[in-house]
Amino acid sequence: GGAPAYGLVGAAVVDFPTGLNAGWLAAASGIAFTLVAQQVPPLQPLATPEAGAVLVGALTAYGAAVTLSLAGCPAAALGYAAATAWACRGIASESAKTPPIVKTTAARCALVAVAAGAFALAVGALKR
């Protein structure tokens, strides 16, 4: 049993991209939810700037938890954290047509994602 011992190459070509993909899927799901909420009248209260900020925060909290749960597979944890931080930086960018409250929240959440990734790497290193 146990995880395969494929080393650095496996971490680089399997684990990191898998974590990155999973993180992007979570971010894309949040964006898709907002787009649906904008179009479906009963869900429109969930498409306000304040709700968008809450959604970014919730997805980041979820992403941090997933990142930490992947500490035993540091490359996957790093990929998930990177995707979460990257998505948050995109939302917070000046070119994004995003309400200020969402941009501010996303900028802070990018830091949370990076911190979760660093913590997961440290925990993973201690486990070895």
Image (cartoon, rainbow, N blue to C red):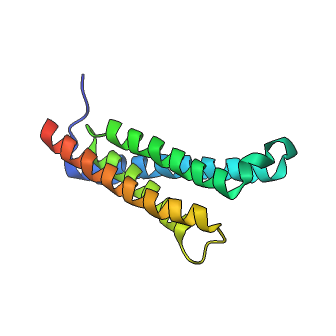
> What residue occupies the far right of the structure in this picture?
41
Q: Looking at the image, can residue 128 be seen?
A: no
> What residue occupies the far top of the structure in this picture?
1
Determine the image quadrant of residue 84.
bottom left
The residue at the point 69 percent across, 47 percent down is 33
The residue at the point 55 percent across, 52 percent down is 56
The quadrant of the rendering that contains the N terminus is: top left
Return the x and y of residue 31 as percentages of the image width and height: 64, 53
The quadrant of the rendering that contains the C terminus is: top left
| Left or right placement of residue 50 versus residue 66 in this view | right
Please say if 125 is above or below 83: above
Return the x and y of residue 104 as percentages of the image width and height: 52, 65
Please say if 68 is above or below 49: above
| Left or right placement of residue 87 versus residue 18 in this view | right
Determine the image quadrant of residue 72.
top left
Q: Looking at the image, can residue 54 be seen?
A: yes
